[in-house]
Image (cartoon, rainbow, N blue to C red):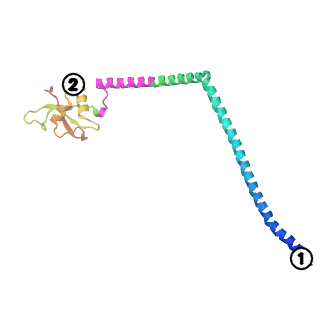
Amino acid sequence: MRKILLGFLIVASAAFTAAPACAQDAATQQQIDKLSGQIQDLLDAQAAQGKRIDAVEKKISDLGDKLSQPAAASDNASADDLKKLAAQVQVIDQKRQDDNQKILDALDKLGKGGSLPASHKPAPVVPTTSTDNPTPGTPQKGYEYKIAPGDTPSAIAKAYRAQGVKVTSDKILAVNPGLNPNKMVVGKTIFIPDPDAK
């Protein structure tokens, strides 16, 4: 019985010592499997990267071939683009010429004195002697004028000159003290001198 018990103990101790060795082998195998999987993933990624590099090299090679070939096909497109651009430039130039002509016509009309709006054309009143004369003792002949919206001394002088009254904006300002050319008061009556009036 002692022999049996001793044999049983030997078998049990061998089993206990074998169990940690089996467990250790299983853990090592698990680590080996994990490393093998990671190596396989790296190899797959390397293969995919190689395919991408090959594709990029092919595109670069194709672009190099296109650059080295004569650009016959692209010349036609460029010529068409240039023709379209030239047509657009001609249209713009024609518009510019039309605008220039309109400006010249407007300047010509202004030079003839016929372009002032009706509100800017002063209607002369019967020549009077001014009692508001800025130079007392020397009555002047001229006209009274009521300032309209948008009037300026130069526009008023121009309109009177168109009617034969030889007056300048400086003369209008000189005989109307306190008249501010930058702040014309609408409705205010001013005196327009006429050196030729009798």
Please name whichever residue, 4 or 47, is drawn nearer the observer in this view of the structure.
4
5 sits left or right of 47 in the view: right
Q: At label 1, which amino acid type do we have?
A: Leu
The magenta segment: 93-119
Disc 1 crowd, CA 10 A, few/some/many (<14, 14-19, 20+): few
Instruction: Name which residue lies at 86% across and 74% down.
Output: 9
How far across and how far down the image is residue 149, in percent?
29, 38
Residue 8 position (above or below residue 90): below
| Disc with the residue nearer the chain's start (2 vs 1) | 1
Magenta stretch mostly in which secondary structure? helix
Q: Confirm whether the magenta stretch covers residue 106.
A: yes
Q: Quadrant of residue 30?
A: bottom right
Q: Which mark is residue 164?
A: 2
Q: At label 2, which amino acid type do we have?
A: Gly
Please name whichever residue, 59 or 49, is drawn nearer the observer in this view of the structure.
49
Disc 2 crowd, CA 10 A, few/some/many (<14, 14-19, 20+): few
Mark 2 and mark 1: Cα distance apart in space: 152 Å
Instruction: Name which residue lies at 67% across and 39% down.
Output: 52
Instruction: Name which residue lies at 24% across and 37% down.
Output: 147
Q: Quadrant of residue 153?
A: top left
Furthest residue to the left? Answer: 137
The quarter of the rendered structure image containing the C terminus is: top left
17 sits left or right of 179 in the view: right
Instruction: Identify the residue under disc 1.
Output: 5
How far across and how far down the image is residue 102, in percent?
38, 25
Q: Is residue 172 visible?
A: yes
Please name whichever residue, 10 or 198, is drawn nearer the observer in this view of the structure.
10
How far across and how far down the image is residue 36, in percent?
75, 51
Residue 32 position (above or below residue 58): below
The quarter of the rendered structure image containing the N terminus is: bottom right
